[in-house]
C-alpha cells in the first residue's frame, strides 16, 4: 500500500515542482535579451580559385558604374569632380601588368576606391583577371594564317 | 471485492494527511514562485530600459553647397528655405541629421574646406544642433581628411532620450563600409539593448537600390546580418535624391528628400543626370523630413516639400 502512495505522491510532487518552475522560468527566459538564445547559422566555407567569371561578377557590382560595361570609361555615374573614370580597354600591357592592376584595385587612389578594405586577395586577383580580359591591346589574337593558294599545276599533280 | 474497494478508497485515506501538504505546497509554489520570478523580471526590465521621451528631429540631405549649374540655380536659397521651415516648426526639433553631400565635390582641398565651413556656418545660424555624416562629394577625393578637420568624426554614435543613433561612413573609401568599420560597428552594438529603437544614418543606402548608379553599399549585407537580433532598426539615408521606402528583414530604410535637386527613379541603364531646374516648379522634388519619436519608440515620418513651404510663406 505504501508503495502505491509513494508512486502517486512522487507524481504529484514532481508535477507541483514543474508547475511551480515552468511559468517563472518562461518569464525569466523572455526577460533576457534575444541574442543569448540565437544560434548563428553556420556559413559553409567554400574555397574558390580566382577566375575571370568571378571577376566579371565583381566588376558588375563595383566597377561598371564608373568604368562602363565595356571598360571604356563610359559609366552610368558621373564622378563628383566631373569627368570620366579611366579607360580599361586601352591599357599598355607592358606597364599595366596583372600585379600592377591588382595593386591599384587594392590601394585605390584619387577617386578610385581602396577595394583592399573590403575584398579578399583572391577577389582582387579575379577582378584583375577580368580587367585584363577587357584590354583590347593585350587580348590574345587567334593565330590563324590564310593558306597561300596552290598553283594549278600542283593541284593537277595531286589529283592524278 | 474487498481488494477492489480498498484500492479505490486507499488514496482518499492517505490524502487527508500528505495530500494536503502536497496540495498546499503546490499552491504556494505556483503563486509564490511565479510571483517572485515575475517581479524579478519586471525589476530587471525597469532597470535595463530607460523610458523613451517623445522628441522630434529633422532629416536633411544632399544640400550640395558650392554647386553651380542648371540643376539648381541657387542651392543656398533652397537650403535656407528649408532651414526657415525647420525654424518655424512647432514643437521645435531637438536636432537635425544631415545625411551627406553637404557640399558639391571639388578636386581642391582648400575649396572643399571652404565649402564645408560655409555649410557649418549656415546651419549654426539656425541655433539647432546638428549631426552630419559625409557624402562622396565631401569625402571621396581625400578619403575624408578635410571633412574630419571641419565636421568631426566620420562615424560615431549617441543616445538621445532613450533612442540609439549611429552615424556611418559608407562613402569616404568607396561605396562600402570596410572591415575596420564593420568591426567597430559590431563593438558598438554589442553594448546596446536590442529592444531599444536604433536609428542608423548614412549617405548611401545600406541595401542594393541600383548598383549601376552606385546606389548601394557593397558590404551592406554584412552589417544588416549583424543587426538581425535587433527589433526596431531604422536607416535614414540620402544619395538617391528622392523618397524611397524599403524593408529588409527587420530593418526599415528611408531615403530623404534633397534640398539640391531631384534625380530620376532607378531602372534604365543610362547615365545618371539631373534635369534643369524648371521656372514654373523650381522646388520640384526638394524638401526635408520631420521625424517624431513617440513614447512607444515608434517613428512618425512627415515629408515637407519645399514647394509647399514656399507656397505657404508666399500666402502669408
Image (cartoon, rainbow, N blue to C red):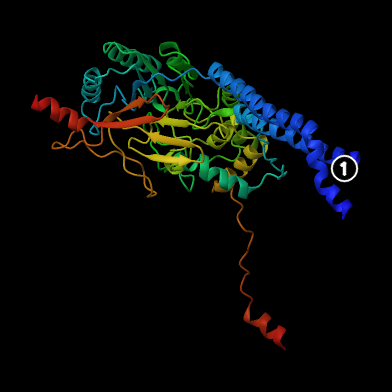
Q: Is residue A21 left or right of residue B122?
A: right
Is residue A112 visible in the rendered image? The answer is yes
Name the residue tied to disc 1.
A4
Q: Quadrant of the C terminus of chain A?
A: bottom right
Residue sitting at x 64%, y 59% = A143
Please report, as a chain letter, where disc 1 is located: A
Q: Quadrant of the N terminus of chain A?
A: top right
Q: Position of residue B220 (x, y in %)?
A: 53, 35
Q: Secondary structure at mark 1?
A: helix
Q: Position of residue A151 (x, y in %)?
A: 63, 78
Q: Position of residue B105 (x, y in %)?
A: 37, 25
Q: Callout 1: 10 Å neighbours few (<14), some, many (20+)?
A: few
Q: Quadrant of residue A101?
A: top right
Along the line of sight, which residue is nearer the eye, B199 or B278? B199
Residue found farthest to the bottom: A160
Q: Is residue B260 left or right of residue B220?
A: left
Residue sitting at x 37%, y 14% = B113
Residue found farthest to the left: B315
Q: Position of residue B121 (x, y in %)?
A: 30, 11
Q: Is residue B132 left or right of residue A96?
A: left
Image: B142 above or below A71: above
Q: Is residue B6 left or right of residue B149?
A: right
Q: Quadrant of residue A99?
A: top right
Along the line of sight, which residue is nearer the eye, A104 or A151? A104
Is residue A107 visible in the rendered image? The answer is no
Amino acid at each position: 500500500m505504501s508503495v502505491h502512495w509513494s508512486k502517486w505522491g512522487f507524481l504529484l510532487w514532481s508535477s507541483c515542482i514543474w508547475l511551480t518552475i515552468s511559468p517563472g522560468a518562461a518569464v525569466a527566459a523572455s526577460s533576457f535579451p534575444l541574442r543569448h538564445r540565437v544560434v548563428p547559422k553556420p556559413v559553409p566555407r567554400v574555397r574558390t580559385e580566382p577566375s575571370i567569371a568571378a571577376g566579371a561578377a565583381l566588376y558588375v557590382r563595383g566597377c561598371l558604374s564608373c568604368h562602363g560595361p565595356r571598360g571604356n570609361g563610359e559609366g552610368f555615374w558621373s564622378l563628383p569632380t566631373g569627368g570620366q573614370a579611366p579607360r580599361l580597354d586601352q591599357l599598355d600591357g607592358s606597364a599595366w601588368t596583372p600585379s600592377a592592376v591588382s595593386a591599384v584595385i587594392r590601394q585605390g587612389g584619387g577617386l578610385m576606391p581602396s577595394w583592399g578594405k573590403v575584398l579578399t586577395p583572391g577577389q582582387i586577383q579575379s577582378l584583375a583577371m577580368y580587367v585584363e580580359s577587357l584590354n583590347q591591346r593585350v587580348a590574345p589574337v587567334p593565330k590563324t594564317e590564310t593558306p597561300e593558294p596552290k598553283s594549278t599545276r600542283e593541284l593537277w599533280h595531286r589529283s592524278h | 471485492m474487498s481488494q477492489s474497494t480498498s484500492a479505490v478508497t486507499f488514496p482518499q485515506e492517505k490524502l487527508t494527511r500528505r495530500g494536503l501538504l502536497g496540495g498546499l505546497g503546490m499552491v504556494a509554489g505556483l503563486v509564490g514562485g511565479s510571483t517572485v520570478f515575475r517581479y524579478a523580471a519586471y525589476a530587471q526590465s525597469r532597470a535595463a530600459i530607460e523610458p523613451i521621451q517623445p522628441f522630434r528631429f529633422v532629416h536633411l540631405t544632399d544640400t550640395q553647397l558650392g554647386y553651380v549649374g542648371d540643376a539648381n540655380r541657387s542651392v543656398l536659397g533652397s537650403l535656407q528655405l528649408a532651414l526657415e521651415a525647420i525654424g518655424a516648426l512647432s514643437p521645435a526639433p531637438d536636432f537635425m541629421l544631415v545625411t551627406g553631400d553637404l557640399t558639391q565635390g571639388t578636386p581642391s582641398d582648400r575649396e572643399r574646406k571652404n565649402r564645408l565651413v560655409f555649410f557649418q556656418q549656415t546651419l549654426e545660424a539656425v541655433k539647432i544642433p546638428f549631426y552630419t555624416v559625409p557624402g562622396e562629394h565631401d569625402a571621396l577625393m581625400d578619403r575624408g581628411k578635410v571633412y574630419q578637420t571641419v565636421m568631426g568624426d566620420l562615424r560615431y554614435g549617441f543616445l538621445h532620450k532613450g533612442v540609439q543613433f549611429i552615424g556611418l561612413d559608407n562613402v569616404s573609401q568607396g561605396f562600402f563600409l570596410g572591415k575596420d568599420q564593420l568591426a567597430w560597428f559590431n563593438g558598438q552594438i554589442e553594448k546596446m539593448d536590442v529592444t531599444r529603437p536604433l536609428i542608423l544614418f548614412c549617405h548611401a543606402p545600406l541595401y542594393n537600390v541600383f548598383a549601376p548608379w552606385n546606389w548601394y553599399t557593397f558590404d551592406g549585407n554584412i552589417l544588416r546580418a549583424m543587426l538581425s537580433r535587433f527589433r526596431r532598426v531604422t536607416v535614414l539615408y540620402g544619395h538617391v535624391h528622392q523618397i524611397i521606402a524599403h524593408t529588409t528583414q527587420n530593418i526599415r530604410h528611408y531615403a530623404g528628400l534633397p534640398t539640391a535637386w531631384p534625380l530620376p527613379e532607378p531602372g534604365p541603364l543610362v547615365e545618371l543626370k539631373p534635369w534643369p531646374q524648371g521656372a514654373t516648379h523650381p522646388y520640384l522634388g526638394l524638401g526635408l523630413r520631420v521625424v517624431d519619436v513617440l513614447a512607444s519608440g515608434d517613428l512618425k515620418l512627415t515629408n515637407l516639400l519645399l514647394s509647399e513651404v514656399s507656397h505657404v510663406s508666399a500666402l502669408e
